[in-house]
Amino acid sequence: KFAQMGTVSQVRRELAAFLSHASVETDGFSVTREEHHCVNPITGLDGNVYCMPCKQQFYSEETKTCTQSYFADELSYFQHCDLSRQNNQGCSCTVAGVKMADVPLQDDLRAPAIGYVRADDMYFRRGSFDTSFNYGYMGAGIAIKGDAQYFCEQPDLLATNPQYAWQSGIYKWMEYMPYEFGSTAHKQALKGNFGGTINVLNGPLECPSSMNISEKHVQKVRDRVREICRASSALGVMLELNQCENSYDRDCPKCDGLEDIFFSCQQDGSCPECNDWEENLLSLAPTVTPAIVKPPTFEDWGKYWNNPNPGTRNGATSSYPSSVWYSIVSVVVLIIHI
């Protein structure tokens, strides 16, 4: 069971590791959709959300804008569809892809929306973790609803419904097991092996953690190191960056290069949260077992953002400091059960 196994220290370590990854995947708990696949989402008169997909090379992380329409050189949107995994292995998708949609808008209020696709026709990354591809959404449907087609037909629920957003992340945390490993992120967290959680979840994209892979993923590993220091300090626990010695150990993999990033970010000042990590151990934290309290009702994950417009969640900025976010998220995670 998620965050309910082992000692109090193990439970806190698992929560710290889980929240660290969730924070990185959601840009500090502020986005629930993969941004360059859903630029400036809008809600049509039919109630559906529509996304403007953008190729990575034309997307600006800083301005959250796209300089060239995806359909400038494409007849259809074809992404996150594994044609080899259909029927009982994945949601239905075709090589023909998805055509650009005619978004129903009030003509007297807005110009026509060009280059948009209905969000529920796309299987890009959503939720608190990376749920993506047609097979990922089918797996989430089976685990969460007992219905293989549930998220195939409405994948954007993982972005708009906070319960599904968190449950899909917990499902991946508990169940995702790459063929090269005989372990899950959940098992690695119980071992106190943070590097193992990275390797299980992201494999060669982030382990080894070097510029030979990509600058983007090296930065994501840096972010994970910073976040595990922050979450562990808040929860008063310590996780080993690498508990094991072999990157290919099926039961206890390591993430090569993680220690180098830890020490380099301390030296360059990019992870000040790690400077006093060792001082915030469980022995120094409150020893009273937290009471299970009724969680806040989140009508939408975007409730705490500074952007109130329907269908425009990408790029929104949290109005709460990180310490408050960890408190809020910890309560939500503790009471969600798949």
Image (cartoon, rainbow, N blue to C red):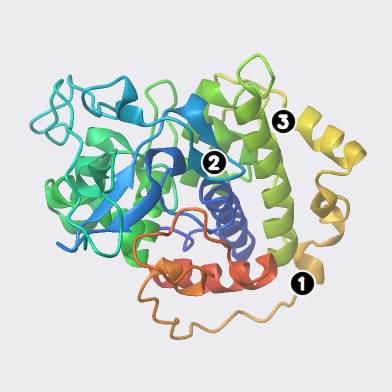
The mark closer to the camera, 1 or 3, is 3
**Image height check: is 225 above or below 146?**
above
In the drawing, what numbered circle is on residue 188?
2
Residue at the location (65% across, 43% down)? 224
Residue 221: percent from left, percent from top: 65, 35
Of mark 1 and mark 3, the one earlier in the sequence is 3
> In the picture provided, is 104 more to the left or to the right than 164?
left
Residue 258: percent from left, percent from top: 72, 30
**Image height check: is 212 above or below 169?**
above
Q: In 3D space, how far apart are the residues under numbered discs 1 and 2 (Cα atoms)? A: 23 Å
User: For the residue marked with disc 2, what is the amino acid?
Assistant: Gln
For disc 3, the marked residue is: 258
Q: Choose between 327 and 240: the one closer to the eye.
A: 327
For disc 1, the marked residue is: 285
Q: Say what secondary structure mark 3 lies in.
A: helix
Residue at the location (56% across, 54% down)? 14
Residue at the location (69% across, 19% down)? 211
Q: In 3D space, how far apart are the residues under numbered discs 2 and 3 (Cα atoms)? A: 15 Å
Q: Quadrant of the N terminus?
A: bottom left
Identify the image quadrant of residue 166.
bottom left
